[in-house]
Image: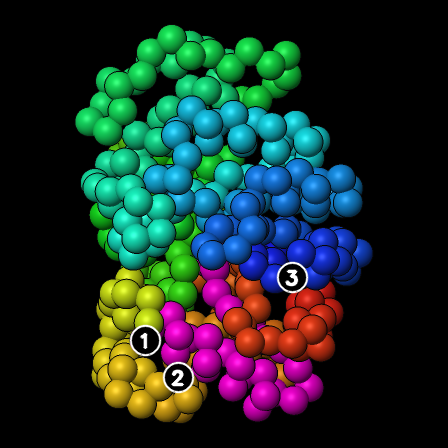
Amino acid sequence: MNVGINVSDLKYDLMRDYAVRAEEKGLDSVWVGETWGWEAFTLLGELSQLTNEITLGTGIVPVYTRSPALLGQAAATAAEASDGRFVLGLGTSGPAVIENWHGDDFERPIGYTAETIDVVEQVLSGETVSHDGTSFQLDGFRFRAEQETDGIPVYVGALGASNVRMSGALADGWMPIFVPRPRIEALYEEFAESATQRGRDPETLSVAPNTVAAISEDGTRARQAVRHHIAFYVGAMGDFYHRTLSEAGFERNADAIREAWQESGPEAAAETISDSVIDETTIAGTPRQAHEQLDSFAETPADEIHLFFPRAAGTDLMESTIDHLAEY
């Protein structure tokens, strides 16, 4: 199983340093997403010049914040800058981000993503784009750079069954985010069945769970950092993560996190998170614990895993995490 790190929203110099460190340590990929921090494609262009072999990807950029044609152009540019080491990771984000932060309508998220993938692939093919859909009616544009752009992998960050099925039908990879391992197994059946129905071999498609990681000889400290991270996402970031945890059999814990967050705050919410949630959802603890958790992910359909740091992690914990991941 390939192992990569996500460096989104760290201090700018740290993102650069950790991308280089990840390559030097032998990790397989570095990912940059977009939430409330840096813009992804500019940073990936810079990282492409600081690294030589490691795969670079967007993990994720929301489909609503750029036109699909511009996403195709951006993907082609990033692939050219990195000598073909680029993967385009797309997702919808959520209504709070898209409507409140970007002022766009969070409409038809699955259909919107499917249409975006179609347009992106047409742009990358070098042929004239023609798309008559519900969200977009496009005609006449052709990407005219004199470079080979076809074949850039497109991954989708998807949680719900319908979105996972769309990913199996259209994308090159599926990125389940914060999904406990038993739920990955169940959702993969939807992904694989949808791919097969479209005449695609699911074995040729990637499954790349995204989750939080903290590894230290002080395993208690590492796991506590992860607890606070989960508390924030389940307690404060809408329904997506709460529902995902609930559907994996942790409904009572998900409810307890949300209730504690609303009534007593982050510290109380973090304390409600069980060891089982940590062990089945994240990579956290001592090096031995982390490697056992990685082994467990490798026993699922996952062929790669993308790991980001807890929101409150210091540089010592982040560097320890990279170094211990490299030992896996």
Residue 1 makes an appearance in the image: no
Q: Which element is circle 1 on? A: helix
- Label 2, label 3: how far apart the Cα atoms are: 23 Å
Residue at the image position 29 percent from the left and 57 percent from the top: 96
Residue 100 makes an appearance in the image: yes
- Label 1, label 3: how far apart the Cα atoms are: 25 Å
Q: Sequence-wise, which precedes: disc 1 or disc 3? A: 3
* Quarter holding residue 159: bottom left
The region drawn magenta spans 207-235
Q: Which element is circle 2 on? A: helix
Query: Any magenta on residue 292?
Result: no
Q: Quadrant of the C terminus?
A: bottom right
* Quarter holding residue 55: top right
Residue where numbered disc 1 is placed: 235
x and y, in percent, of residue 166 in the image: 29, 40
x and y, in percent, of residue 231 in the image: 39, 78
Specify whether 327 is left or right of 266: right
Q: Quadrant of the N terminus?
A: bottom right
Amino acid of disc 3:
Lys
| Image disc number at residue 11 | 3
Amino acid of disc 2:
Pro
Specify whether 294 is left or right of 172: right
Q: Which element is circle 3 on? A: loop
- Label 1, label 2: how far apart the Cα atoms are: 8 Å
x and y, in percent, of residue 45 in the image: 66, 38
Residue at the image position 55 percent from the left and 45 percent from the top: 40
From the viewer's side, name the closer residue of 274 and 268. Answer: 268
